[in-house]
Amino acid sequence: MSRSVSRGLRAGAVALVVAVSGACHRAPPAPPVATTRVDLPPSYLFAPTDIVVHAGATVVWTNHDHFTHSIHLTDDGGNSMMVPPGDSVRFTFTRPGLHHYDCSLHPHDMHGTVTVLPDSGRAS
């Protein structure tokens, strides 16, 4: 094997290792977004995924996808609300803490959290 072919193979192997290790790196999760609105765009996800609200806030999920999804509140009695395309559902969070939810139809792809802070004492 010639020296240039050997160098080329070595460079290719190094490039492959760098590409694979870069693909395995995950960005840190984004911090929760202060909002009471979550969209379900046509991509099997919640946007934003993680939100923060004050106790007493009503969160609205709106389905902009072409498929029916659900909001399954896993930490709040397992309440599940179906959301056909174009519809919205609401839930009022009264208990401070971290609340998990998913789409019971697509739980591996669609999940999120609502961090509920103690009531701010402000009038709504």
Image: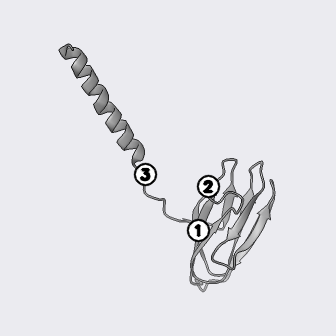
The image quadrant that residue 9 belongs to is top left
The answer for how far apart the CA atoms under marks 3 and 2 are is 16 Å
Marks 2/1 in contact by CB < 8 Å: the verdict is: no
SS for dot 2: loop
Q: Quadrant of residue 37?
A: bottom right
Q: Residues within 10 Å of mark 3 (few under 14, many from 20)?
A: few
Q: Judge the density around disc 1: few (<14), some (14-19), many (≥20) Cα neighbours within 10 Å.
A: many
Image vertical order of residue 18 relative to residue 12, above or below: below
Q: Nearer the viewer, mark 3 or mark 2?
A: 2
Of 47 and 81, nearer the camera is: 81
Side of 66 relative to 120 (left or right): right
Asked if the residue at tag 2 contacts the one at tag 3, i.e. Cβ–Cβ closer than 8 Å, the answer is: no
Horizontal and vertical percent for residue 35? 62, 66
Name the one closer to the observer, 110 or 90: 110
Q: Which residue is mark 1?
A: 113
Query: Does the CB distance between marks 1 and 3 fall below 8 Å?
Result: no
Mark seen at residue 50:
none
Say which residue appears at 61% left-offset and 57% top-offset: 108
Q: Nearer the viewer, mark 2 or mark 1?
A: 2
Question: Is residue 107 visible from the viewing direction of this image?
Answer: yes
Which residue in the structure is indicated by mark 2? 109
Residue drawn at x 66%, y 51% is 44
Residue 17 position, x and y percent, is 32, 37
Rendered image: mark on residue 26: 3
> Could you tell me the amino acid type at mark 1?
Thr
Q: Between 94 and 72, which is closer to the camera in this rendering?
A: 72
Which element is circle 1 on?
Answer: strand
Three-letter amino acid code at disc 3?
A: Arg
Query: Is residue 5 or residue 45 the one in the foreground?
Result: 5
